[in-house]
Image: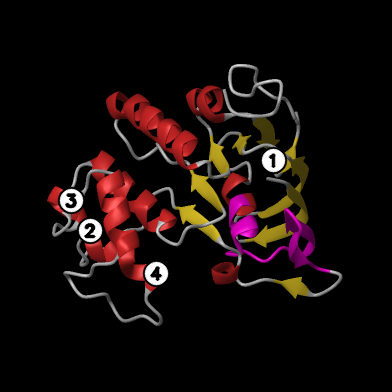
Amino acid sequence: MSLHVDIRKTVRSEARHFHLHVRFDAPARRTVIYGPSGAGKSLTLQAIAGLLTPDEGRIAFDDDVLFDGTALIDVPARSRGFGYLFQDYALFPKLNVRQNIAFGLHAGWRNPPRNVAGDMVDRWLRAFELQDVAAQRPAELSGGQRQRVALARALVHSPRALLLDEPFSALDPALRERMRQELDELLQRIGIPVVMITHDPDDLQRFGEIVLHLRDGAIVEPEARAMQAKIRPDGGNA
């Protein structure tokens, strides 16, 4: 994976003007953007996903230019090929697990049927051991199950990369480490590139091949470093 980001964005509200100016190149399969709340992490991830339009700059993934303010290129979010995991998971409360996973596979805004099936839906139900709760709604699930449903929905499209917004912050502390391990094992198994934002140093240690420190809207301590416990000398995952 090769991700290039060089963007500027000013967000205005009654309380303040926030200036985001982020520039980095991430050649590894796992990139963690790390920093305190309010640093601009979510804005950066949203810009990569196409959910936020920068004022100027350029975003490219591998050989594809996703945004270029000068060339007037702005690829829509649905066409960028990313799976996005929101911090609060953003599950549809009135849809069951199957419907939530399958939602984005259907054109338009019509809800999938309650018993929706399909190879990809069934694959991720099995992968995350959600078969027994497939007919339940999000309110009936545990925190870990809700996270698995959200991950399954992000993966059902076979995305070329996963964008993770504070993926463990909504979990109880006792559950976070188990879910980190499960996600780590899944990522190693399916080999999908990941960009994660977090303020938790434990996420940094587990997933950070490329570590970018963000503060006040800018990279303050860029560390394009390969963690030896994660990457072999030949560039593969350990």
The reply to whether dot 1 and dot 3 touch (C-beta < 8 Å) is: no
Looking at the picture, which amino acid does disc 3 mark?
Gln
Q: Secondary structure at mark 4?
A: helix
Q: Secondary structure at mark 2?
A: helix
The residues tagged by marks 2 and 3 sit, at their Cα atoms, a distance apart of: 9 Å
> Does the segment drawn in magenta span residue 59?
yes
| Residue visible at 75% across and 30% down in the picture | 224
Residue in the foreground of this view, choosing between 30 and 35: 30
Give the residue pinned by disc 2.
Answer: 97
The reply to whether dot 1 and dot 4 touch (C-beta < 8 Å) is: no
Q: Picture coordinates of residue 229 (x, y %)?
A: 59, 17
Sequence-earlier tag: 1 or 4: 4
The residues tagged by marks 4 and 3 sit, at their Cα atoms, a distance apart of: 19 Å
Give the residue pinned by disc 1.
Answer: 216
Sequence-earlier tag: 2 or 3: 2
Task: Tell me which segment is drawn in magenta.
Answer: 45-69
The reply to whether dot 2 and dot 3 touch (C-beta < 8 Å) is: no
Q: Quadrant of the N terminus?
A: top right
Q: Picture coordinates of residue 89 (x, y %)?
A: 37, 52
The residues tagged by marks 1 and 3 sit, at their Cα atoms, a distance apart of: 43 Å
Outermost residue on the top side: it is 229
Give the residue pinned by disc 3.
Answer: 131
Quarter of the rendering containing residue 175: top left
Mark 4 or mark 3, which is nearer to you? 3
Give the residue pinned by disc 4.
Answer: 104
Mark 2 or mark 3, which is nearer to you? 3
